[in-house]
Image (tube, rainbow, N blue to C red):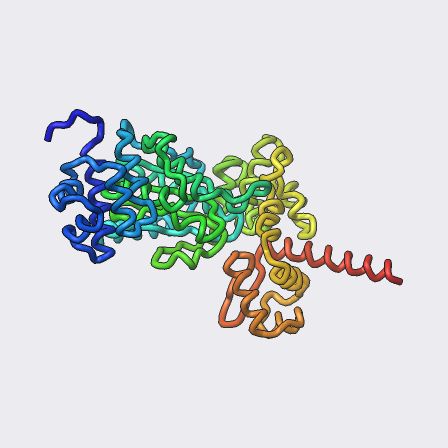
Amino acid sequence: MQRADRISQGHLDRFGAALRRRREQEGISLRRLATLAAYSPGWLSKVENGLARPTLQLAEACDRVLTADGELTALARVTLAGVTWSFPPAQLPPGDGAAFVGRAAELRALDRMLDRAEENDAPFTVVVDGAPGTGKTSLALHWAHSVRERFPDGVLHADLLGYGPDTAPAEPARILAGFLIAFGVPTASLPAEPAQLAAVFRSLVAGRRVLVVLDDAADTRQVRALLPTAPGSAAVVTSRRRLTGLGGIARLPLGPLTPADSITLLQTVVGTPRVAAEPASARFLAYACGHLPLALRITAERLAAGPHRMLRTLAADLADPMGRLDALADGEDRECAVRSVFDTSYHRLTGEAALLFRLLGGETRAEVTVMDAALLSRRPVAQVRRTLETLADEHLIVETGPERYRVEGLLRLYAMEHAARARRALERGRLARA
């Protein structure tokens, strides 16, 4: 077919496929659509099969008949803009490379999940969730770099700022606009409505192999419109929250490193000879950091900054649990501190959840039952059960068994700090009233 315009066959095919999909969803025959939209069946057939160029008037008429909420009109604008894919987007930021440590089991699991989706010709989405500081972003980026060659049509990346300390979570519409621009859609042709942006994005990536990496998601709402839905594409999402509302997606919970991998991380940053020279101190540092990658890297960088610094000296600094979080901070970067990272999760809790988290921090028992927590908070059992589930979904506590929960590692120290602060505030209030 000879063409004088710049519209690629691929874009005509995408518009035609979207029109056919909408028509079949509504259960309307091509002839019936032609009658309702006042176009000839032959012309609509050519448009559906990518043999004719759609017009805005045709798209608007079909939108109206098929109640497509402007999807077809938005896609027609993009199609008529002559979008060209001169090169696939490659938005993936650098990973840790050789500095990445451990997570062999998790990487194998991600590979198996992707292989299974490809075998079943299904779209693939996996959510990597876990407590703050567990290295979710590092894992996602490392894996994405390892499989990027399997996605020749592009790799997209977005920081969703779900738990940024000073910023609101990114709006999906802004992220979608960036994705479309990366694929060559002119800014002037971008749809105004978020739903239309999502529809155009899905249509543009349909039939292509694209990987989408969505880092630090706040909730399900933020993610849903950003996921490719056609077979062949994949998405990996990181979040501190269990995004149970997505449904039908794979989950990979991420916990602390193993003790062996914790030592390997210290060796990678500090140097094997220095770590091998003080094995007992290295083991204690790994324990004191809760085997948390963020804490381990802060500790390791502090040691690496001074070639004469001894592991035993830093181990002594971390020996006092009540001062441990003070030591686990980067002096230059306020955000690179374990306490600051925990803060961004804690400050997003409801008042009820924050109260229960503080109460658990004041508990001497390692584990509590739902009934224990109800007695502590003086709240109904059913209400406390829901609050505990919320804290577990935020990965601030761990569900250890039926109706049993625990605050682990450095998060326990953090909860204890807030419990002590609340007690002091209560005492000051009592003194002020006396």
Q: Measuring from the top left, give residue 346's x and y in whole percent.
A: 60, 53
Location of the C terminus by quadrant is: bottom right
Choose top left, top right, bottom left or bottom right for residue 409: bottom right
Total numbered labels: 0
Q: Measuring from the top left, give residue 341's x and y in whole percent.
A: 58, 46
Q: Is residue 264 found left or right of 391 in the rendered image?
A: left
Residue 321 sits above or below residue 172 on the image: below
- Residue 147: tell me if it is visible: no
Q: Is residue 390 found left or right of 121 in the rendered image?
A: right
Q: Is residue 93 found left or right of 324 in the rendered image?
A: left
Location of the N terminus by quadrant is: top left
Query: In this orientation, which residue lies closer to the viewer: 217 or 257?
Result: 217
Q: Name the outermost residue toward the right.
A: 434
Q: Measuring from the top left, give residue 22's x and y in whole percent.
A: 25, 51
Q: Measuring from the top left, give residue 93's x and y in whole percent.
A: 42, 34
Choose top left, top right, bottom left or bottom right for residue 192: top left
Q: Residue at x 11, y 43 (%)?
A: 42
Q: Is residue 36 found left or right of 248 in the rendered image?
A: left
Query: In this orientation, which residue lies closer to the viewer: 29 or 324?
Result: 29
Choose top left, top right, bottom left or bottom right for residue 426: bottom right
Q: Residue at x 57, y 40 (%)?
A: 298
Residue 403 sits above or below residue 300 on the image: below
Q: Residue at x 52, y 61 (%)?
A: 392
